Amino acid sequence: MTTWLITGCSTGLGRALAQAVLAKGDNAVVTARDTATLQDLAAEFPTTALAVALDVTEQSQVDAAVRQAEERFGSVDVLVNNAGYGYRAAIEEGDDADVRTLFDTNVFGPVAMIKAVLPGMRSRRSGAIVNISSIGARICPPGSGYYSATKAALEGISGSLKKELEPLGISVTAVEPGGFRTDFAGRSLTQSAKAIDDYAETAGKRRKENDTIHGTQQGNPDKAAEVIISAVEAEQTPAFLLLGADAVYAYDAVEEAMRAEVDRWREHSAGTGYTE
């Protein structure tokens, strides 16, 4: 039986994935900062669900979560780094302390989780790591520069990690969801206290008080969870996975625009070597 450790299970994609994993009969270590949000899962699946308090920015809690998982189920076979949150601000508006906290949660927290599970995975020469990124890492919307940067960093780590772990039988997948009907654009979204008038028509349009997207996203978290499970269980686990039609269309548009830019400057770019 496969054991999953999923961070950020109180709501949204993490919650949907935890429910899907447990419904199919696998073990799941379901985590959240407040375990009261997880008690219904633990009660519904008393033998296969383990609810654990976890703030991924606290190393002691990271270590404790992995230790409890191994004590209860013997191993962590799949780690899903889902915990994280959004932050909106024009780059100039961003508060330094807020930005550091964002990186602690969205980048360094997943890294701590990865480092905690890897000794066991390496010893077994098997395992899967799933890092939940965002299409924001690719499209970089105005007002989401810091959030996009955290997800781009996570994808860079995922790419190198895949090459390091593939010879050891461990897969790594970076997942880029588009808009899903979760709390991400609501409760889980923060923003800078400061708003500069000059950014009203760019970053300002995406501030929470001006954004009407919450609750209207087309993405279904339950369907996304099923795709993630299928990807992890596939004979060839993908290194990169888009989720949502909007993510697919956005990826294609960015790739096409980037290709045109590269081609436009190809001669200049390639002509920077020594000529003698």
Image: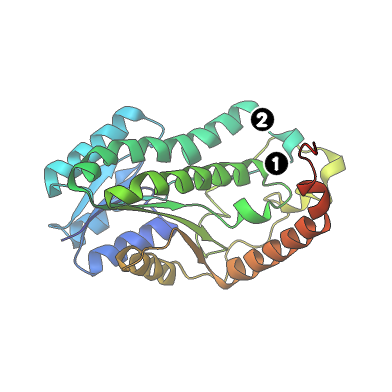
**Residue 6 in view (yes/no):** no
SS state under label 1? loop
Which colour assignment does the render follow? rainbow
Residue under label 2 = 95
Tell me the crowding category of disc 2: few under 14, some 14 to 19, or many 20 or more residues within 10 angstroms, Cα based: some
Residue at the extreme right? 198
Residue at figure coordinates x 71%, y 46% from the top left: 143
Tell whether 116 sits left or right of 264.
Answer: left
Residue at figure coordinates x 14%, y 57% from the top left: 46
Residue 95 at x, y percent in the picture = 66, 30
Residue 220 at x, y percent in the picture = 48, 70
> How many callouts does the rendering have?
2
User: In the picture, which quadrant includes the N terminus?
Assistant: bottom left
Q: In the image shown, does 148 or 172 lie closer to the viewer?
A: 172
Q: Give the amino acid at mark 1.
A: Ala
Q: Which mark is residue 89?
A: 1
User: In the picture, which quadrant includes the C terminus?
Assistant: top right
Q: Quadrant of residue 22?
A: bottom left
Q: Earlier in the sequence, mark 2 or mark 1?
A: 1
**Residue 21 in view (yes/no):** yes
Tell whether 225 sits left or right of 69.
Answer: right
Q: Mark 1 and mark 2 in contact (Cβ < 8 Å)? A: yes
Q: Quadrant of residue 257?
A: bottom right
Q: Give the amino acid at mark 2.
A: Asp
Q: Which mark is residue 24?
A: none
